[in-house]
Image (cartoon, rainbow, N blue to C red):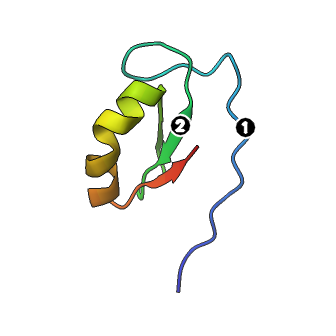
């Protein structure tokens, strides 16, 4: 049984990368319920690790 994913609002120009502050293009939703926002560069850099921890990636 899987838990439903809560709808998250679309990313806006005000959303910034948690790593560098650039415009966020990707939201990573963590199994713990938290979320991280990444620019395209950092999303690609951390994608493998995020998948390892079963984070849901929203583009």
**Depth check: 46 or 5 in front?**
46
Residue that appears at 36% across and 37% down? 44
Q: Determine whether label 1 and label 2 are within 8 Å by CB.
A: no
Q: Quadrant of residue 15?
A: top right
Rendering coords of residue 1 (x, y %):
53, 87
Label 2 crowd (10 A; few <14 / some 14-19 / many >=20) = many
Residue that appears at 56% across and 30% down? 25
40 in relation to 30, above or below: above
Regarding mark 1 in the picture, which secondary structure is present there?
A: loop
Regarding mark 2 in the picture, which secondary structure is present there?
A: strand
Which residue was labeled with disc 1? 10
Outermost top residue: 21
Q: CA distance from mark 1 to mark 2?
A: 10 Å
3 in relation to 31, above or below: below
24 in relation to 28, above or below: above
Horizontal arrangement in the rendering, residue 12 relative to residue 55 (left or right): right
Rendering coords of residue 11 (x, y %):
67, 32
Rendering coords of residue 6 (x, y %):
67, 58
Which residue was labeled with disc 2? 26
**Depth check: 20 or 30 in front?**
20
Of the 4 image quadrants, the one containing the C terminus is top right
Label 1 crowd (10 A; few <14 / some 14-19 / many >=20) = few
């Amino acid at each position: 049984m899987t838990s439903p994913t809560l709808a998250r609002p679309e990313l806006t120009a005000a959303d910034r990368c948690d790593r560098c502050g650039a415009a966020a293009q990707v939201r990573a939703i963590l199994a713990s319920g938290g979320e991280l926002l990444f620019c395209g560069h950092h999303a690609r850099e951390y994608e493998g690790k995020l998948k390892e921890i079963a984070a849901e990636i929203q583009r």
